[in-house]
Every structure is written in C-alpha cells, then in structure tokens.
Amino acid sequence: MIDTTIFQDKTAVYYTLGCKLNFSETSTIGKTLKEAGVRDARKGEQADICVINTCSVTETADKKCRQAIHKLTKQHPNAFVVVTGCYAQLKPDVITQIEGVDLVLGAEQKKDILQYLSTLSRDDNKGGAYVTATKDIQSFVPSCSRGDRTRYFLKVQDGCDYYCSYCTIPFARGRSRNGTIESMVDHAREVAVEGGKEIVLTGVNIGDFGKSTGENFLDLVKALDEVEGIERYRISSIEPNLLTDEVISFVASSKRFMPHFHIPLQSGSDDVLKLMRRKYDTTLFASKVMRIKELIPDAFIGVDVIVGTRGETEDFFEDAYNFIAALDVTQLHVFSYSERPGTQALKIDYVVTPKQKHDRSQRLLALSDEKTQMFYQRYIGKTMPVLLEKSKSGTPMHGFTANYIRVELENNHVLDNQIVNVCLGELNEEKTALCGVIIN
C-alpha cells in the first residue's frame, strides 16, 4: 500500500517527446500523480517532480531527449527527475549518467511510477534504472489524453511484432498487446461524459489489435462506433497489410469514423521494401488506396515515407518517387533515415549521403505540398462541418473538416469544441489551411 500523504502539495512538470502515443501515456502518468495529491507546477514555479517521457525513433530524437533532460534539471534543480519512454528502455545506462537524473523507468515499470517515487529519497540513494528485458514486457496500460486541443488520443494497442530492418520500436516497446474492446468502449464513454467530441485511436501497430485478447480491430471500431456522444473517430497510422477491405467498407458506411486514413508506405520501391523487411509490396499498397477512393472519394489519405535508407540507390528512389507521384493520396510525412544501433539495416552496404537524403526529402515534400493543395482546392466554395479547436487569444481559430481539411477563421472562444458549418474559401497566406466563414 502506497502512502500517498507524502505526495500532498507536491508539484510536477511533464515533458513529452515523440509520438501521440507518448503524449497519451504522459497524460495517464499525470493523472496518476494528480490522484495521489500532486498538482501541476505553475509557470515559473520550481517543481518537486519532473517526468520526461522520451522517444528514440531516430538519432535526432535521442539527442533531443538528452537536451530536454539537461534543460529540465537546470530549471528544477531540486526536483526528483524521472525519465521513461523508449529512450529510457533502450539506453538506461546512458541516461543514469546524466547529472540530475534520479530514476529511469522502462516500458514495464512506468505504470508503477507512484510506487517507485514513494520509495525514492536522496538520503537512501534508491534511485537508478529499472528496466525489464524486452522479451519480458507484458503489461498493457490504456491511456487517453486531450492535451491543449480538442481531440482525445486513445491508446488501444502497444508493442510490435514486426521487426523491420531499420526500426528499434519492437525493442523499446515489446511484443504486440492490447486492452479489451470493453475497456476501450469504457474509455470512449468517459470522453463523451467529459464533453469530448473526437477521438483518435493510437498505438504502435493498431491494426494488430486483438492479439492478446482474441479480438480484432474491425470489431473494435464497430463497438466504438456505437458510443453515444462521440461525434468523430479517426484511425491513426495503420499498416497497409492490416487495413482490410472490411475496415475500409465499414468506415465508408460508419456513423462516426471519419473519411481519413494514415498509411505508412515507407518506400515506393519494391526492392527497398524488401530490404526494409516490410510485409507488403507496392501493388498491395496501391490497391488499398484505390479501394478507399472507390468507396470514399473524399477521403484524406496521409502517407509516411522514409528517404535515404541503406540500399536506396538513385534508381530505387526514382522508382519510389514515380510510384508515389501516381498515387491518389493527400499528404506525405517525410522522414530521413537514421542509423539505429542493433538494427539489421546496418548490414546493408549501400549508404546514402546526407546531401542525397536532404535532396530526396525536399523533392518529396514539394510533391506533398502539391498534392495537399490540389486536394484542398477541390473543396473551395463548399460548406462543410468543422470541429473547432481551442486557440490562443489574438490568433486565428482552426479546426478540421470530417476529411481532415484544416480550416482557419476568426477567433471566437465560445465556439471551442463546437461543430459548425463553414463555407470554405481560398488558401491562407501560408497555404496551410483554407480560410472559412461560419454559416448560420
């Protein structure tokens, strides 16, 4: 039994790096500490506890994690500093050597942060690193976060059984596992009670949902679709080989799942996909895009692409570029390949230079802008429902249509978290949103 009286009137700050899944998990950690009596530190206030939730998807991510730790330990010199997340799981020995860090918690331990903090004292020196071997990571802790915006992010799955040659995530998060459909529905109902209107389903490999409970992703979305009070769901990144025709068909006829897909391609070259050890080829990927557009012509389709992986020759990149250019997709999320220690990709001989990576990224980003603006222009002059998001005073208000078109309009805080009909106008000056006018 934890004596929570020791946490009364303590203050905490939280810093999250990386994906939406991390933000969702930080939210759960914060809720746990709040229930024990810990409040958020006010701006400029010295915190008693610092929690840093880290990412390790690239070398740059690792660097940002170290910088964040240094920054927070200087800002809060008397705080207990707890580091968790993917970087903590993969590099606990490196983090414990950073001055000011008291506690490092791996993927299996972060759910028990209260227990570790309750025994931590600078007098008895019980800090250090607590990390379970990847193969022994078994627990699934659901989490749901709202953050500063309107959308909620619901973690439905964790871990990954896909050992792609370039990726360390399976080592950082363990095997694929999930909560039950019943528990996910309960979380969605809680969001509805709080007044939330939109939920994004998140995870490491969400299409793999059901492995640890004998259920499946299609049944999950069907169950969530019945939750009263939730107006919109969005499916975050889902592997193309797990995006079944049944799921696409269900979204097409769904009451609440939006016409919005995010599908990782990673490369448009079959040769590179083989080197990456991906579980599909370009033919399968193209068929998924075609099926979506057949059933849901207005669907927004975002695509992840990695450039400069080992083995990506100039010819392979040109194959990839041409394939992507021909796809009827809306937006590209472009990442430059980063060497990850311990991955199989390091055994591939051909290395792409930093300049080549940069040049290829720029070409794909330009292609992405072209595709996005063409998609947006199709809707100029139309009136569409927009869910408006909270914005800072004095700045324009933004929101999204059902098919994820970003809309900009005059600020009116009364309309936070409201769905209103908006007539869509021309692109804004930055070409990042369509200007809109509310239609009464």
Image (cartoon, helix red, strand yellow):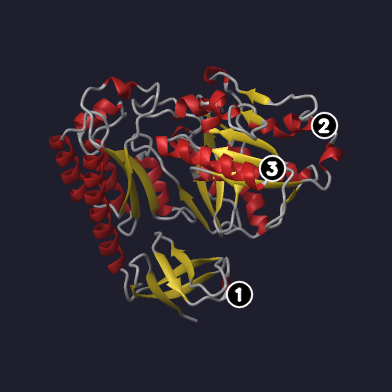
Residue indicated by mark 1: 414
* CA distance separating discs 1 and 3: 40 Å
Query: Which three-letter amino acid code belongs to the residue tagged 3?
Result: Pro
Corner quadrant of residue 321? top left
Q: Position of residue 397 (x, y in %)?
A: 50, 71
Q: Quadrant of residue 205?
A: top left
- Locate the N terminus by quadrant: top right
Marks 1 & 3, CB-CB < 8 Å contact:
no
Q: Nearer the viewer, residue 347 or 123?
A: 123
Name which residue type carries label 2. Ile
The CA span between labels 2 and 1 is: 42 Å
* Numbered tag placed on residue 2 in the rendering: 2
- Which tag, 2 or 1, sits closer to the chain's start? 2
Q: Left or right: 410 with respect to 8?
A: left
Which residue is at the front of the view, 266 or 105?
Answer: 105
Under mark 1, the amino acid is Val
In the displayed structure image, the side of residue 373 where residue 415 appears, left or right: right
Q: Describe the element under mark 3 as helix, strand or loop.
A: loop
